[in-house]
């Protein structure tokens, strides 16, 4: 009898421990970004968003936040839906294609002789400071496939954010949209036959 009571108590305590674990939260940078262009509004060219690279210290699913002078915390319960490089790449693809009224044809066959503008992005800083700012510092390049002419630029987008991780992620979404607008402007100029200044 005592043994059965002990086992029941252990089971209740184990279940109680599971129930008290804090829930995990998942975030995405591409939610709400980009609008599919109407067929009549499509540009006469395509884009090809190459895989994005990010610094190793933030290349993980957990949010990595700056909390003090040189200190960074890894948040086990606050996570990206996919690795940050994939999140940024998807969000940039949606932002640029939405701005231009075209589609991203990365790893997709395109009609013969259709102009394709290849975009490469290297994120050099991806900083998250809850209640303060969200920052993305990226070097990117655009060139028409088959052409030797390359435009390489740098965009630094810093957004002030309120308290909480939802606000932090929203700040990163705004930063991605700003960088996407810079890239879209460059693609539009190249498609018009001019080499824009960064």
Image: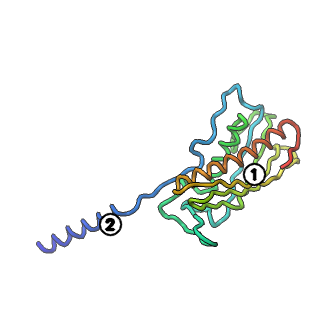
91 sits to left or right of 121? left
The x, y position of residue 166, in whole percent, is 52, 52
| Residue on which the image places disc 2 | 17
| Residue on which the image places disc 1 | 120
26 sits to left or right of 161? left
Quadrant where the N terminus lies? bottom left
Colour scheme: rainbow
Q: Residue at x 62, y 62 (%)?
A: 59
The x, y position of residue 153, in whole percent, is 81, 53
The x, y position of residue 133, in whole percent, is 62, 58
In this view, the residue farthest toward the top is 40
> Height in image: 51 above or below 112?
below
In this view, the residue farthest toward the left is 1
Q: Nearer the viewer, residue 89 or 145?
A: 89
Count of all numbered marks drawn on residues in the image: 2
Q: Residue at x 13, y 74 (%)?
A: 2
> Height in image: 49 above or below 163?
above
């Amino acid at each position: 009898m005592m043994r059965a009571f002990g086992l029941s108590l252990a089971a209740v305590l184990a279940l109680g421990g599971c129930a008290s674990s804090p829930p995990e939260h998942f975030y995405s940078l591409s939610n709400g970004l980009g609008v599919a262009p109407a067929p009549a509004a499509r540009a006469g060219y395509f884009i090809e968003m190459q895989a994005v690279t990010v610094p190793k210290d933030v290349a993980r699913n957990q949010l990595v936040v700056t909390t003090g002078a040189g200190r960074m915390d890894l948040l086990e319960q606050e996570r990206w839906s996919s690795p940050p490089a994939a999140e940024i790449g998807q969000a940039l693809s949606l932002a640029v294609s939405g701005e231009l009224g075209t589609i991203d044809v990365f790893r997709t066959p395109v009609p013969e002789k259709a102009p394709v503008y290849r975009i490469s992005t290297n994120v050099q800083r991806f900083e998250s400071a809850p209640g303060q700012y969200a920052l993305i510092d990226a070097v990117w390049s655009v060139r028409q496939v088959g052409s030797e002419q390359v435009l390489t630029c740098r965009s630094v987008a810093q957004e002030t954010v309120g308290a909480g991780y939802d606000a932090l992620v929203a700040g990163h979404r705004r930063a991605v949209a700003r960088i996407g607008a810079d890239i879209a402007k460059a693609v539009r100029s190249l498609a018009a036959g001019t080499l824009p200044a960064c």
